[in-house]
Image (cartoon, rainbow, N blue to C red):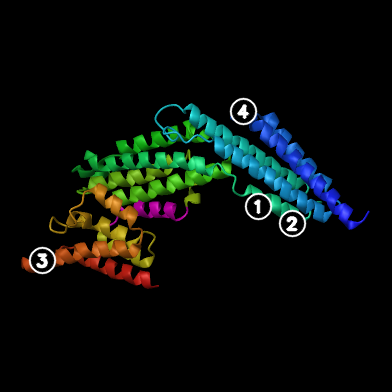
Amino acid sequence: MNRSSLTKWENSFLSKSLAKLLEPVRSMWHLNQVPTMDQVDNAIRVIAEALSISLADKNLSISLAYSVAKSIKQMNVEAEQRLCMDSDVAQIIEAPTSSQQKNADLCNALYYFTSQIKRVLANMNSMLPPESIQIVQNSLKDISSLPVLNLFAESIKNSLYLILMTMHDEPDLIRAEDPNSKVISCSPYMKELQQFVSRCKDIYLSLFNEKQALNECCIDISKSCIERFMQHVCNVRPISVYGRAKLQADCKHLETSFAPLVNDITELGDHYRQLKALTLLLEKKPQDIAKSQHEGALLPYSLVMMYLFSYGGQQLLAPHVCAGWNIQKLIQWLDSHKSERDRLEFVAGALQRYQNHVRQNQITCYDEVYPVLLQLLDEGRKSLKK
């Protein structure tokens, strides 16, 4: 047989193979919004057969791998077209809606499909050309439950942010009582947060089977919650000695709040270490806080400085108060200004206004915490140059 005839035969074979690969994928979506497990298994079987046919010929194997990739892409496209994007698709108040359940079922069907294809590749790893394996693996990269999970994550984070905002309404934070006189429990808002996190995991996030995407989503929620929690804690005004101890208890309870979301809290990396550092910071005096920052800063200088303003007298106004902002406005500003340089200069502006106030009113001495703040500002600026 000459090469021309062989090429014609090969092209005909590849055309028929592609049609055979696409047929079970298209038929499973013809009448169903979500395919059955048997239908998905049938598509996987056809793919496995196609890959095994070409084991003896490298070029044919690579060509068939591209056909397999097309069928995988078709599977993903069909599923994405059926995802619901209604207004209630990310609601986390009532039981999961039919749209939410359907989206989860679609994601789970895709996850099962991709995991089984990966298993087929693993079983044929020693027989298939590396190029063929890579082609199929590349076609699987974009298939994930994460986009749908992220819709839930945004709703969950927004609700957590609202709960954390109520921290500033807690009467215990200005309570005039010795914190050593009794065991201090966590604040009501923290109990609400714990219950909310547990409920979201049990009712909504548990709908999804893709552990890697689910873990990524849960870590994102946990990190965002820690970051927002620290911003609020460092800007509570006014705050008593008892209030600082109360917030320290809240820090410890926040750790346990993430148990439903993350198996190992150390997966939260720097966010977890910063939460531990904040717990210790709440029991220290300003000079000791400055010393800790100098020895090894785990917390951003700007955040520590915002907290230290709470030790000042009435004339040493917090940066956001100087700007005429409420706490909501401050949080919005922090969200849109992630740069530590911007945040340090924001705090520096409050110190400059205080210095001007002292000079204009011929006040004889500065607030005790003012030199500590200046020291930290200088160290913070130097740290940016390293």
Q: Going from the N terminus, do you reach mark 1 or mark 3 first? A: 1
Give the labeled residue for mark 4: 32
The magenta stretch is 269-285
Instruction: Tell me how far mark 1 sits from mark 3, CA to CA.
Output: 65 Å
**118 or 147, nearer to the observer:** 147
Q: Which of label 3 and label 2 is nearer to you?
A: 2
Would residue 369 be found to the left or right of residue 334 on screen?
A: left
Q: SS of the residue at dot 3? A: helix
Q: Mark 2–mark 4 contact, CB under 8 Å?
A: no
Q: Amino acid at mark 1?
A: Asn
Query: Which amino acid type corresponds to the residue marked 3 in the rendered image?
Result: Val
Residue type at tag 4:
Asn
Rendered position, 363 above or below 129: below
Tell me which numbered mark, 4 or 1, is placed earlier along the sequence. 4
Which-is-in-front pick, marks 1 and 3? 1
Name which residue lies at 39% across and 33% down: 195
Q: Is residue 214 magenta?
A: no
Which percent across, then down, holds residue 280?
A: 35, 54
Q: Give the number of callouts.
A: 4
Instruction: Write down the residue under mark 3.
Output: 358
> How many residues crowd around disc 2 within 10 Å: few (fewer than 14), some, or many (20 or more)?
some
The answer to whether 146 is drawn above or below residue 335 in the figure is above
Q: CA distance from mark 4 to mark 1?
A: 27 Å
Kindly indicate the quadrant of the structure image that contains residue 242. top left
Question: Of circles 2 and 4, which is in front?
Answer: 4
Residue hosting label 2 = 131
User: What is the C-alpha distance between the residues marked 3 and 2?
Assistant: 73 Å
Task: Give the Cα separation between the discs numbered 3 and 4.
Answer: 74 Å
- The verdict on residue 271 being magenta is yes
Which of marks 4 and 3 precedes in the sequence? 4
Q: Which residue is mark 1?
A: 138
